[in-house]
Amino acid sequence: MNFKRKLLLAALPFAFCLSGLAQADMTLKIAEIHPAGYPTVVSQENMGKAIEKATNGELKFRMFSGGVLGSEKEVVEQVQIGAVQMTRVSLGTLGPVVPDVNVFNMPFVFRDHDHMRKVIDGEIGQEILDKITNSEFNMVGLAWMDGGVRNLYTKKPVRSLEDLKGMKIRVIGNPMFIETFNALGANGIAMDTGEIFSALQTGVIDGAENNPPTMLEHNHFRNAKYYTLTGHLILPEPIVISKATWNKLTPEQQEIVKKYAKEAQFEERRLWDEKSAASEAKLKEAGVEFIEVDKKPFFDATAPIREKYGAPYAELIKRIEAVE
């Protein structure tokens, strides 16, 4: 048992003692790497306001957007010890912490964007949230945000799998993502979001992979003018709350938090679709070329990744495929 875990366990009896006291003035700190105005930020701010109103101010909230409380990995660590109460986190970041979520991280596990949404809205989506909650990592899974379709953006055009060979591509720090791009013939390089702009500028990397709003909002398009529609990942992103915080809430407060987190799931989706379409238009106006490719060679090249990482989830993958 590591020192951090010992500290957490030692603190639990105190947390349970507190749970019986009045909950006035508890502030839920919500951390986001994305900037103000981003769909996930706006929907969580509205969630916080709704929770505050429904609890008559017993639960207040503060949004910390733009990565001011650290990288996603750093924020997850803060949520685990209760220093930050809530966050929306990429499954890529969560995968090494809660391995069960990796079924959604595999390349081409979803047919398309609509398929992903149907999966997370149904029983499979709830099962994965429950896996987060029931893990030993001190987080409760509340709802899903839509992280859109991840494609490839580069300094030189990628029109085929061959063009990708030898390119240094930034990925989230998850071994599966590194191996995915290695399988495609590139060199997957783990890096925090905040480092991508300068790494593109200085040539440390040749490209990255993400959705259009992220490429636009983080100004990556200034150094990467080619956007190749590989659609290799379609990632849902959970909203999680610190288990230490969750255990301090009354059952009524827990229900309120769950309710408005689920409402945020659907509000964010509407905002996402609007933002994504607007971002694509702005990127094209800025001179970014959108490149259609034959996805089959990309799909075939990543088969070893699905075989290696998919083995523990064989039945679950069949159920995902069966969702119409």
Image: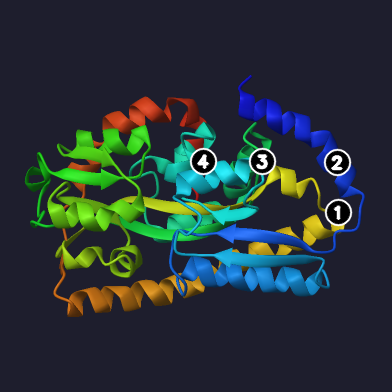
Question: The disc labelled 1 sits on which kind of residue?
Answer: Thr
Say whether disc 2 or disc 1 marks the residue closer to the N-terminus: 2
**Element under disc 4:** helix
Query: Would you name the residue on which mark 2 appears?
Result: 16
Residue 221 image offset from top left, x and y in percent: 21, 66
Q: Left or right: where does residue 267 sit relative to residue 196?
A: right
In terms of depth relative to the viewer, which is nearer, 133 or 305? Answer: 133
**Element under disc 2:** helix
Residue 322 in sight in this render: no
In terms of depth relative to the viewer, which is nearer, 64 or 258? Answer: 64
**Element under disc 3:** helix
Q: Left or right: where does residue 184 sit relative to residue 237?
A: left
Question: The disc labelled 4 sits on which kind of residue?
Answer: Arg
Number of residues whose C-alpha sits closer than 10 Å to that of mark 1, classed few (under 14), some (14–19) or many (20 or more): some
Query: Would you name the residue on which mark 3 appears?
Result: 133
Question: The disc labelled 2 sits on which kind of residue?
Answer: Phe
Query: Would you name the residue on which mark 4 appears?
Result: 319
Residue situated furthest top in the rendering? 1
